[in-house]
Image (cartoon, helix red, strand yellow):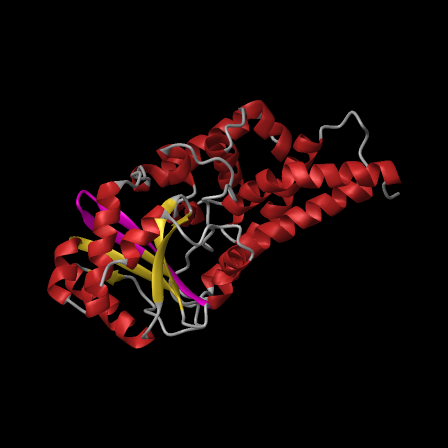
């Protein structure tokens, strides 16, 4: 039986209050903004249709429902990603305005970074759910057990297994700042003019670049290794795309580079990770399907188009 008019009003209030938190949970579980939005919509519809008792906690009920919906999607997603063309990267999300919840410190930013989101693909669905609920959302094992219909000891075992599988691959995300901005400025300036020597100086010897084109646009099908190879690929990429505008934007907790065509269409996002004073990893998304959510964020002006950092980069020749 559907909700009454009072229930509909309550549902609207729940929608307003819970959607950002639920989206952040679903995105961390799926790595896809589009699928996360779908899971949240389905959960809210289920709440409205079920009309739970007033004594039920909307926060807990919805979190459990979203998690269960995401677990079903993860099983199907694994098969799709096995057949994915080229490297798979998560969909970029602009985070300056809290789209993924509060990211107040390096640990919180690191848990939504491209590096961590990609590593989470190593986990099976239940391990990933426990890890996200525990590490990212700070849920107790008792709460996790209720969400997943498991015992607390089982949840602890899954958490331990997840941390072990991620192990030394997990890295602490460095916070931005003046030095990071200066390095991005130099990187962008060298790329724009095709200065291979300067690019190589900015790249670590063992730098790795991943380009996610998904078979939709031309892109390297394997990771690019080494400073000489990465520098040539970056320089050639800028030459191929022509007159694009590149500006910084906080993507998944990191100041990243966003490229738009003269028409205003979003054409790519590059998340740059710094190792010491050099660039150690570059993850770029150019698959247009994966840029739709971010494009919508920009179009709807939920993210500032002007900013202090952008001014620095726009001044680079």
Q: Is residue 182 left or right of residue 56?
A: left
Q: Nearer the viewer, residue 46 or 245?
A: 245
Q: Quadrant of residue 267?
A: bottom left
Residue at 50%, 41% in the rendered image? 98
Answer above or below: position of 46 versus 211: above
In the rendered image, which quarter contains the C terminus?
bottom left
Residue at 35%, 34% in the rendered image? 106
User: In this orientation, does residue 4 appear?
Assistant: no
Q: Percent position (x, y) of residue 18?
A: 64, 37
- Total numbered badges shown on the rendered structure: 0
Q: Which residues are magenta?
A: 265-282
Q: Is residue 67 left or right of residue 159?
A: right
Q: Percent position (x, y) of residue 282?
A: 29, 55
User: Does the magenta portion include 270?
Assistant: yes
Q: Quadrant of residue 315?
A: bottom left
Q: Nearer the viewer, residue 118 or 311?
A: 311
Q: Nearer the viewer, residue 103 or 287?
A: 103
User: Does the magenta portion include 167?
Assistant: no
Answer above or below: position of 72 versus 157: below
Residue at 30%, 76% in the rendered image? 240
Answer above or below: position of 115 versus 81: above
Q: Percent position (x, y) of residue 114?
A: 39, 49
Q: Quadrant of residue 224?
A: bottom left
Q: Nearer the viewer, residue 77 or 204?
A: 204
User: In this orientation, does residue 303 appear?
Assistant: yes
Q: Percent position (x, y) of residue 186?
A: 19, 55
Query: Which secondary structure dominates the residues rendered in magenta?
Result: strand
């Amino acid at each position: 039986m559907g909700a009454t008019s009072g229930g509909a009003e309550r549902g609207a209030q729940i929608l307003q209050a819970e959607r950002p938190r639920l989206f952040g949970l679903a995105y961390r579980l799926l790595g896809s903004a589009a699928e996360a939005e779908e899971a949240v919509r389905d959960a809210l519809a289920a709440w409205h249709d079920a009309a739970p008792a007033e004594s039920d906690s909307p926060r807990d009920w919805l979190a459990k429902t979203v998690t269960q919906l995401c677990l079903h999607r993860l099983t199907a997603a694994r098969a799709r990603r096995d057949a994915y063309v080229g490297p798979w990267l998560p969909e970029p999300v602009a985070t300056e305005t809290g789209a993924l919840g509060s990211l107040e410190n390096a640990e919180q930013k690191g848990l939504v970074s491209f590096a961590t989101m990609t590593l989470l693909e190593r986990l099976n669905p239940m391990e990933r759910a426990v890890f996200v609920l525990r590490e990212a959302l700070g849920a107790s094992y008792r709460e996790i057990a209720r969400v997943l219909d498991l015992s607390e000891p089982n949840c602890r075992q899954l958490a331990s297994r997840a941390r072990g599988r991620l192990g030394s691959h997990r890295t602490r995300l460095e916070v931005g700042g003046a030095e990071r901005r200066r390095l991005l400025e130099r990187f962008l300036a060298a790329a724009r003019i095709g200065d291979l020597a300067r690019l190589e100086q900015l790249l670590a010897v063992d730098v790795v670049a991943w380009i996610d084109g998904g078979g939709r646009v031309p892109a390297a099908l394997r990771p690019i290794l080494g400073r000489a190879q990465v520098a040539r690929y970056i320089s050639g990429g800028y030459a191929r795309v022509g007159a694009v505008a590149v500006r910084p934007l906080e993507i998944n907790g990191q100041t990243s580079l966003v490229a738009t065509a003269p028409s205003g269409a979003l054409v790519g996002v590059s998340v740059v990770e710094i190792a010491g004073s050099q660039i150690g990893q570059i993850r770029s998304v150019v698959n247009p399907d994966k840029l739709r959510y971010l494009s919508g964020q920009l179009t709807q002006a939920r993210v500032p188009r002007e900013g202090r950092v952008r001014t620095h980069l726009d001044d680079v020749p």
